[in-house]
Image (cartoon, rainbow, N blue to C red):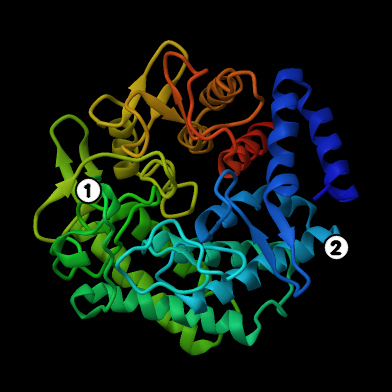
Amino acid sequence: MELTEGLQELLRADCEKIGDEKICQVYQKCFRSTWETTLSMEEDGSTFVITGDIGAMWLRDSSMQVLPYFRAVSDETVERALRGLIRKQAELILTDAYANAFNKKGDFSCYSRDKTKMGAFIWERKYEVDSLAFPILLLAEYIAATGRQDIFTERVLAALKRILEVWETEQHHESSSYTFERDSELETETLQNQGRGTPVSYTGMTWSGFRPSDDACRYHYLLPANMLAVSALRRLCKLSVGKETACRAEKLAEEIAEGIYRYGIVRHPAYGEIFAYETDGMGHYNLMDDANVPSLLAAPWFGFCEKEDGIYRNTRRFVLSESNPYYYKGRAAEGVGSPHTPKGYVWHIAVAIRGLTAQSRKEQKEMLDMLVSTTAGTGYMHEGVDADEPQRYTRPWFAWANSMFCLLVKAYFHL
């Protein structure tokens, strides 16, 4: 789809304010990416957004990809596209709230023939808490930007109730019917224990099968995902969703938050009290951070805590150090990578998040410059780049990363 007049005008105004030619060139390409290459407005009023080089729609990715366009919501076509995405996400959640990605045509096309409850529209059924949290945040952003209450259709309200139902069920995973197994040599592609995952005990947090990288959790109370859920629930209970739904959301937010602070904090010998990445509620912890959002690094960005929070600051120092097994530093870049990509590869999303959660403009500018200098001449963000040789990268067409760059530019230049 071509940019609307409203988006073109916004882009021109932004570049005039930015003033930096190199940053503007990358910003223009990244801003255009989602709209021109991944978004389609359907005849039924819905909007389908593929992730980029994979022709399927992730609930998480699609939510993040469209965030830069909220500033042009007065443009009728932009508003219609955002509204259509919210309604599409609601339909997909009601189709299967445990699926993380969906195909467009309902033709049973999928990533793999997995041992789980598949369906015509399901591309992949890796259950991830954040897949249900991001649509809530997208809805809240839409309401804040437009004030339109007619977005609360019967189907949207039903999808919100379904999210609460799943999160409440997964506080007690032993009673859940969800299982997932994949025939793969990679342990990260399947769940142990006949598809039920490693054991957990009750904490108040809600269980997640997989991380936002689509890799299996080591321990299934994924702290960043639960933090995101708390942020989403706190926003949900303030929306016009009915007293019952609002009260359920508020109660669930309190229970998950209590679980995070009771079971998710570890005293590190070098950094003091920090948030673990994962725990099982039985004394086991995974101390790391992953580049994908939600991450521990991103906690203030999505509203779980303040940048000045003491435990967060300790955690941030840990994440941005070699104590984090997925922090890499090379000649061209440094930052958080992921077990999902090769060792030594820094993710552009994580660099953008570091900038968005920085306490100084100096650090923000350093992250901007790093991103601009590591596109390998393409002018686009990538998934991971080799910290020494950024011309080596994964995923040349990854719209979520492009949108994150745009959000950092917006924050730095006060657009």
* Image label count: 2
Residue toward you, 330 or 233 = 330
Circle 2: residue type: Glu
Left or right: residue 285 compared with residue 169 = left
- Between the C-alphas of marks 1 and 2, the distance is 46 Å
Which quarter of the figure has residue 233?
bottom left
Whether residue 276 appears in this view of the structure is no
> Which residue reaches farthest top?
331
- Numbered circle sitting on residue 187: 1
Circle 1: residue type: Glu
Instruction: Quadrant for the C terminus, please.
Output: top right
- Local SS, label 2: helix
Classed neighbour count for the residue bearing mark 1: other residues with Cα under 10 Å, few (<14), some (14–19), many (≥20): few
Residue at position x 34%, y 71% in the image: 254
Residue toward you, 353 or 62 = 62
Judged by depth in the image, the label closer to the viewer, 1 or 2, is 1
- Local SS, label 1: helix
Residue 276 in picture, x, y percent from top left: 23, 47
- Numbered circle sitting on residue 228: none
Dot 1 or dot 2: first in sequence order is 2
- Residue identified by numbered label 2: 76
Residue 355 in picture, x, y percent from top left: 52, 32
